[in-house]
Image (cartoon, rainbow, N blue to C red):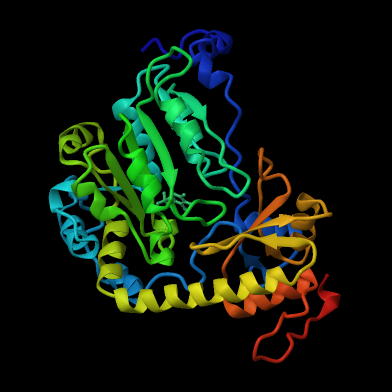
Amino acid sequence: MSFREGPVDVNLLERWLRPDVAAMDPYTPIVPFEVLSRRLGLPPERIIKLDANENPYGPSPRVRDALARYDRYHVYPDPEQRLLREALTRYVEMPFEQILVGHGSDELIDLLMRLFLEPGDRVVNCPPTFGMYAFDTAINQGKLVNVPRRTDFSLDLGGIEAAVTGGDGGRPAKLLFLCSPNNPDGSVVPASVLRRLLDLPLIIVLDEAYAEFAGQSYASWVREHPNLVVLRTFSKWAGLAGLRVGYGLFPRWMMPHLWKVKQPYNVNVAGTVAALASLEDIAYLQENVARIVAERERLYQALRSIPYLEPYPSQANFVLCRVVGRDAQALKRSLEREGILVRYFDKPGLQDHIRISVGKPEETDRLLEALGARQAVRDRQPVTRDRSRR
Ligand SMILES: *Cc1c(COP(=O)(O)O)cnc(C)c1O
């Protein structure tokens, strides 16, 4: 065996890194719950997590039962995901052949890029939006073409059309990523806009992670449009973010090629069991979705009454606010010291904004109190708080 002989020159090995990866900024994920709890000196149950659009009600109780009962964790999952895809045909009313499940919809974003992008191929992105489209484009050596949204977060149609046809003499764009409802503002892509964009000669990937909260979806459009992909997930409405189950609805011609590039065992059995149990308890989960939607409206109205906040109407499970006359990052930090986590984005177009996920009513009350809102309380007693805990 020779591989242990002699000192290995790490500098030489480092030069083997892909230059684009070596030069890349690291991805900054949000601070994990346990770490933050320790840093703030607050027990986990005092922390109100409104920073990642997770479902405050968690999964269906049937998920826990199904996971406890399942007895084949030692066996590899079905690479063709038959049971879950069959169950999904009923839920999304799409043909079995056009559904593919991912380790979260995040995996499917990467999978699409691995399928279509050669180095330098163009991807159109409409920020402010979900960061993974830009992240995965960089990893896959694509060329990101940003067409910023207008200040009201609506899409710049003319700008997108110009970017698609390759105005700079480069190759035409292959992929356009859209998010509806859009993360972070919660607005939906209007049908007329989507119809017009579908006339463009490129593939539109429509990320509908929050469709259940909007009560509308363009999934059925995938039947008629060979250039439309719709991505959905169990992370938000079904409360399975930690188990990583997303799925896509793809045009028929694309499916054989997706199967070729997918990792055979990409979706683990726990995620599959949990997703199947969720689809057997849709009524329960929809009640929680309805609770979140009602709470979103209460939160939005209460935020409107706060002089230094301008909330945007949202169709998702979060509300974006412009912070006026105050430093948004400082506001995020001061909420954090109270154990309330919201999202601040240090990105163009969002520097004076915070995004608040919709929590349970009592969590909204504590948030509003911390924000100094007058309308903090609906039909409940004011929340009394022990100030000494700080
Ligand atoms: C949360 C979110 C997802 C979910 O991704 P998963 O990998 O399925 O958890 C996808 N897209 C957007 C825009 C999101 O905000």
Residue depicted at 30% across the width and 29% down the height: 201
Question: Is residue 171 shown above or below 241?
Answer: above
| Residue 141, horizontal then vertical, whole percent | 44, 21
Q: Is residue 99 visible?
A: no
Question: Is residue 309 shown above or below 62?
Answer: above
Residue depicted at 49% across the width and 63% down the height: 315
| Residue 233, horizontal then vertical, whole percent | 36, 55
Foreground of the two, 306 or 37? 306
Q: Is residue 231 visible?
A: yes
In this picture, residue 51 sits left or right of residue 98: right
What is the quadrant of residue 136 in the picture?
top left
Foreground of the two, 238 or 322? 322
- Quarter of the image with the C terminus in it: bottom right
| Residue 293, horizontal then vertical, whole percent | 49, 72
In this picture, residue 155 sits left or right of residue 387: left
Question: Is residue 16 shown above or below 38?
Answer: above
Residue depicted at 41% across the width and 58% down the height: 235
- Quarter of the image with the N terminus in it: top left
In this picture, residue 375 sits left or right of residue 54: right
